[in-house]
Image (spheres, rainbow, N blue to C red):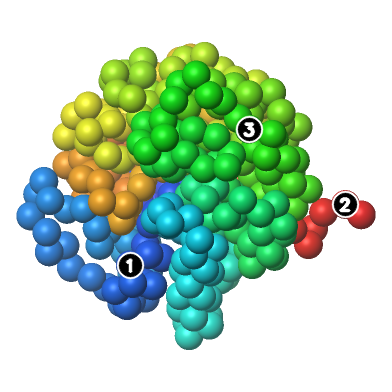
Amino acid sequence: MTLTFDEARALHDEYCVLDLHADTAKLMDKLGYDLVARHDRRMPRGFNVFGHVDVPRLREGGVAGQFFSFWTTPYPERGCARSVAAQLDALDEAIARHPTELVWTRTGAEIRAAKAAGVIAALGGIEGGQALEGELDAIEPFARRGVRYLGLLHFSANAIGRPAKGRGADPAVGLTGFGRDVIRECERCGVIVDLAHINRRGFFEAIAAMAQPPMVSHTGVLGVHQHWRNIDDEQLRAIADKGGCVGVIFARRYLGSASIDAVVDHLLHIVDVAGDDLPALGSDFDGFVVPPDGLEDVAALPNLTVALSRRGVAPRVLEKILGGNVLRVLDAVPAWGRLAP
């Protein structure tokens, strides 16, 4: 049965809807973007590349928790850690000023508690291992500040490995020894390893080095659209075998279409290939991506739930896609401060 928008929105009130990736903190740090104020959709269709997320629209979309991803310009590499810290500071400040609207969370239990209290759960991730500046000791301080995932690569090579595309890309070069050390230290500190943007060889070498569930925070899939940014079926199965999750990006160029049904196509391909414990949402809102029609911003998210229901997705699977699979991974990887002694 196809849901109406209002019925989909009501389901969001029941579920813990989570998005794995939005770049809003960079706007907050560099442009003074007010996360708690409502921002109008000002950009015309086709140029709507940022300004997708704020607290009023998170509430309107029925989102329980948002991962804010902190990205940096990798060259020169020095200063990347400071840039991530500045984005964390901007988010900390917003939370401190509006404690009834936002709360830092690290665990599934904390997200559920925030939802019950009517507060948006904020979570942190880092996009690109250049933020470590080649220092293993950088991971623990980030974990202490609430960072829950680390994307090993972004659009440039770093001390960990090589990107799928970008400066220093080389498909023949995989994970470095330092990269293996980073994975071990992330697992010690309760930081989930994110395999978005890493090249295929590094991807599988990282998988082999892991003991805990990983994620791909934002990606498309090659089984639906051929693009260098997307991952293949073998990669999907590898993440599933490790108990991880894969967030589908809302970027037209990676989806292969401007239709909201393209997001559904990517999500359902993941289900078909690797099961319904794998797919999640990884919008890349505010990341200079143009989202599909019907997903212009986070307030429109119930439209995706409608589109999924139109394709016959059962409520049990809807709940997993919209946030349940992310909660399971968070529950499986203890956060810093909640690690066993």
> Could you say whether the residue bearing mark 2 is in a helix, strand or loop?
loop
Residue at 69 percent of width and 23 percent of height: 208
Cβ atoms at labels 3 and 2 below 8 Å apart = no
* Residues at marks 3 and 2, CA–CA distance in whole angstroms: 28 Å
Q: The residue under label 3 is which amino acid type?
A: Thr
- Residue 314 percent location from the top left of the image: 45, 28
- Residue 167 percent location from the top left of the image: 37, 38
Q: The residue under label 2 is which amino acid type?
A: Ala
* Residues at marks 2 and 1, CA–CA distance in whole angstroms: 36 Å
Q: Which residue is mark 1?
A: 27
> Could you say whether the residue bearing mark 3 is in a helix, strand or loop?
loop
Q: Is residue 59 visible?
A: no
Q: Which residue is mark 2?
A: 340
Residue at 68 percent of width and 64 percent of height: 141
| Location of residue 110 by image quarter | bottom right
Q: The residue under label 1 is which amino acid type?
A: Leu
Q: Tell which tag, 2 or 1, sits nearer the viewer.
A: 1
Q: Tell which tag, 3 or 2, sits nearer the viewer.
A: 3
Marker disc for residue 176: 3
Q: Residue furthest right?
A: 341
- Residue 265 percent location from the top left of the image: 32, 24
